Amino acid sequence: MSEQVHVTKDQLTDATLQSVDDGVLAEGAARLAIESFSVTANNITYAVVGDGFGYWNFFPAPEGKGIVPMWGHARVIESNCADISVGERVYGYLPMASHLDVVPGNVSKGGFMDMAVHRQPMSPIYNQYSRLAADPEHDAAKEDERMIFGPLFKTGFLIESFMRAERWFGAGTVVMTSASSKTSMGLASVAKHRSPDVKRIGLTSSGNVEFTRKTGFYDEVFAYDEIAGIASQPSVVVDFAGNAAVLKQIHQHFGDNLKYSCLVGATHIEARGAGGLGGDAGMPGPTPTLFFAPDHAVSAIKELGPEGFGKQVAESWHAFLTDIGDTVEIERHQSLAAAKDVFVAMVQGNVDPAKGIVIES
């Protein structure tokens, strides 16, 4: 028997712990025991846009329910795949659960793809698993940081690469909502090092202003009720919050000076409004455009090659780790029951952004 956390899709604070019969392991498959994963705003976004982007489809659940995807580490406890050994550890996309069966394919020394039929329609980025024994990104001393920041950081890295390729749409300033979030900090760090001439402005709730300023990632930090005080210069906005009212206010404040409006996440799920992530269709300025990181990752890997892409990411990742220092305190919880409670608290906005949450089995 294994355990899974089932979330009601249209009421994310309704989460329950369920026991499930694992059944007999299929031929060619491997069974993973999930050791640890992080719970971040990224996971909230997966749940908020789950049906529209297929995030609920990776780990099937009963009708009306969903299993939220996480990033973490697991150990092979049973294998019917000749290329995968019992006892080896992997890193990748995991369910909020105790176990996962995968069907390894395209197996290399450094990793494999899960070839389970139901996962093939989704982006291949999410179906890749790293085998830690030969993973150049793996650092045993930094496993927590990788789970907490890694996927979010890569999204920030890809946004900066996209903006720089577009010459920041002629803007000299980037405005980031939910600036205390780990994805926003990732983007700010990469921009600081790779686009140093672009001014970085962070927007956050009044209670997070002090923390956000202390990170050192932003040139200026404003609370959401201070938007009118930001100098209206040619700018792009990267919206991680998904708060329709805030996005509309930004568009109205900057007007024609807003050169691009990029939608990334949805940390303020209670304030999306009738317009959804994009807000009011009648807003002035550019039409908000959704940034889907997996598509950009596939394009970047094709352009740079896996090795070139990996090298660029690694350089920026190490710079980010230096920048972040001990700004974010790692808080560990034991058991899936704790994971359920942390997820609900995060949906409700009751988790301190200065903490990185890790769940251990």
Image (cartoon, helix red, strand yellow):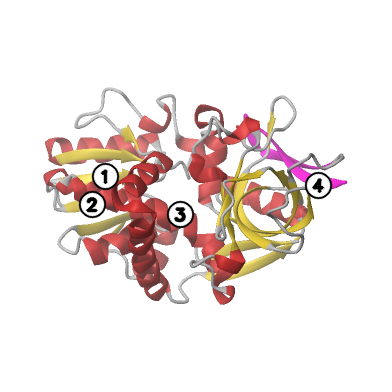
User: Is tag 1's residue or tag 3's residue first in the polypeptide sequence?
Assistant: 3
On the picture, is 113 further left or further right than 183?
A: right
In front of the other: label 3 or label 2?
A: 3
Compare marks 1 and 4 and give the one earlier in the sequence: 4
Q: Amino acid at mark 3?
A: Leu
Task: Point out the tag, 2 or 1, that comes first from the N-terminus.
Answer: 2
Q: Can residue 176 be spotted in the picture?
A: no
**Of the residues shown, which amino acid type is indicated by label 1?**
Val
Q: Residues within 10 Å of mark 2 (few under 14, many from 20)?
A: many
Q: Are marks 2 and 1 in contact (CB under 8 Å)?
A: yes
Q: Which mark is residue 174?
A: 2
- Name the residue rendered at 23%, 51% in the picture: 174
Residue indicated by mark 1: 237
The quadrant holding residue 133 is bottom right
Which residue is label 3 attached to?
Answer: 152
Contact, mark 1 vs mark 4 (Cβ under 8 Å): no
Residue 18 among magenta residues: yes
Q: Which residues are magenta?
A: 1-20
Secondary structure state at the residue bearing disc 4: strand
Using the numbered discs, state the Cα–Cα distance from disc 4 to disc 2 in whole angstroms: 43 Å
Bin the neighbour count of mark 4 within 10 Å (Cα to Cα): few under 14, some 14-19, many 20 and up: some
